Image (spheres, coloured by chain):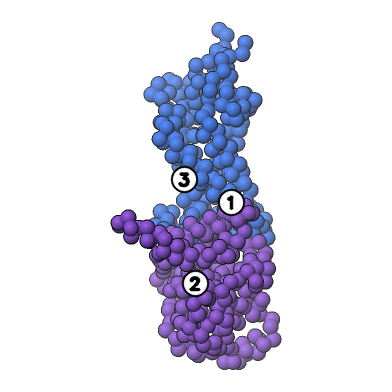
Amino acid sequence: MTGISRRQWLAGGGALATSAALGGCDAPALRDLANPYGLSNALTFATQRWLLRHQPLVREFGPEAISTVFPTINTTDPKDEAYQRSKTAGFADWRLPVSGLVARPAAFSLAELRAMPARTQITLHSCEQGWSAIAGWTGAPLSHLLATVGLQPDARYIVIRSVDGWWDSYDLFDALHPQTILAYGMNGADLPVAHGAPVRLRVERQLGYKSLKYLTSIEAVARVDGIGKGRGSMVAELGFAWYAGI
Amino acid sequence: MSGAIIRRHSGWVRVTHWLSAAAFLLLLVSGIAILLALPNLYWGETGALGAPALIELPLPVNLEQTGWGRNLHFLAAWVLVIAGGVYLLIGMISGHIRHDLVPAPDQVQPAHLAQEISDHLRLRPARGDEARRYNALQKLSYLVVVLLLFPVMVLSGLTMSPGFTTAFPELFTLFGGRHSARTIHFLAGCLLTLFLIVHVAQVFIGGAWNLTRSMITGRYVLPPERGR
């Protein structure tokens, strides 16, 4: 690398790559540097973003590795009335609205998601509570869905909400990763209700709590500091890190 | 009666020692908080309640302590990794590990080792010239802690990180899976805790005030030889 091209890389490409990887200083992982926990979580976030800068895939297993025990925690059958009606109807009326900074807002049915190119991945789920289990997930890549609606250039975070009140946000680094999928299938069958039917998110490079269940909406936004308490996710308001690559 | 005052620990050894000690205590407390969410240990890639466990610890399950537990654990882990990394780097470059921690040839003679074991059993700390250096058992235990147990702790801890292992999946191969790494992390943590207990007990046996002061100020009063 010559001096000039290196300087150009530092000035242009480097800054661009860094801001794309870290999401800028308003990123939820970088917003609380005055607090020791915020600082160490930011250090972890920045380090892992650098280590993962080439977007490697997480390990995938063969079907023989699928766990017989896969715990279900938190919500396992949402009480929400509309959800229960939809469940009885086999989720035929379920829709996933995609809104915000997109060119073509739309609401997708389960059949429409199933008609998209599908990805199946057998991966290790690591729960914040310490347990891990392996399962196969089938779904549409979030990147495909976002390409379908057309992300606007100023969209930098994807906010996803769940029927049980959980919500979380993902920067494009994670949202556009090939293994970030909207899963409607588990271990070759329909996604069970206890695991988040009809559709859950899979974010494989972070702890399980980032893989929201029971999805109800997707929104593309420029910033997340105006949502909720401004910490980027519901669990961050309860003291858990927004970035859970740990 | 009082002996000569010598300089015992370099500044960087003292600073990294206390930073690591503080970080270790915080890691221990927060590690227990995290462990209580699943006080079972497994072998292989996976592990969960209902799956066959390798060890079921007789501890109460508590799911409510992992939020602060993880925040504190990873904050302290960064302090430990940075302090430990600085220690190893300077320790290698300066020759501290080679000169001060690797036992000298005369210390590994069977007769010398037998004498050390006998002195340890009778709780008789070294005096005079022998107190200018660490004894062989002490050196070996420091080497095991610094070159084996802490590196194993850090690497087995990182093997539980979904982000880090995406970059370095070789860690799963090294430890035989995420839950094997978790079990090894626990066992190595137990050994480090045992080391801490013996280490602190030895400080009291060897002279708590003198030894603690030497790790703070670097000045150590050489205990005079015993009268004959």
| Nearer-the-camera pick, A183 or A244 | A244
Name the image quarter holding the N terminus of chain B: top right
Residue found 47% across the figure and 85% down from its top: A148
Camera-side mark, 2 or 1? 2
User: To which residue does mark 2 refer?
Assistant: A172
Are the two marked residues, 2 and 1, in contact with CB atoms closer than 8 angstroms?
Answer: no
**Mark 2 neighbour class, 10 Å CA radius: few under 14, some 14 to 19, many 20 or more:** some
| Circle 3: element type | helix
The chain carrying label 3 is: B
Mark on residue B151?
3
Q: Is residue A143 left or right of residue A236?
A: left
Snapshot quadrant of residue B172: bottom left
Snapshot quadrant of residue A226: bottom right
| Circle 1: element type | helix
Chain that is purple in the image: A
The chain carrying label 1 is: B
Residue found 32% across the figure and 55% down from its top: A3
Amino acid type of the residue tagged 3 in the rendering = Pro
User: To which residue does mark 1 refer?
Assistant: B75
The chain carrying label 2 is: A
Mark 2–mark 1 Cα distance, whole angstroms, equals 26 Å
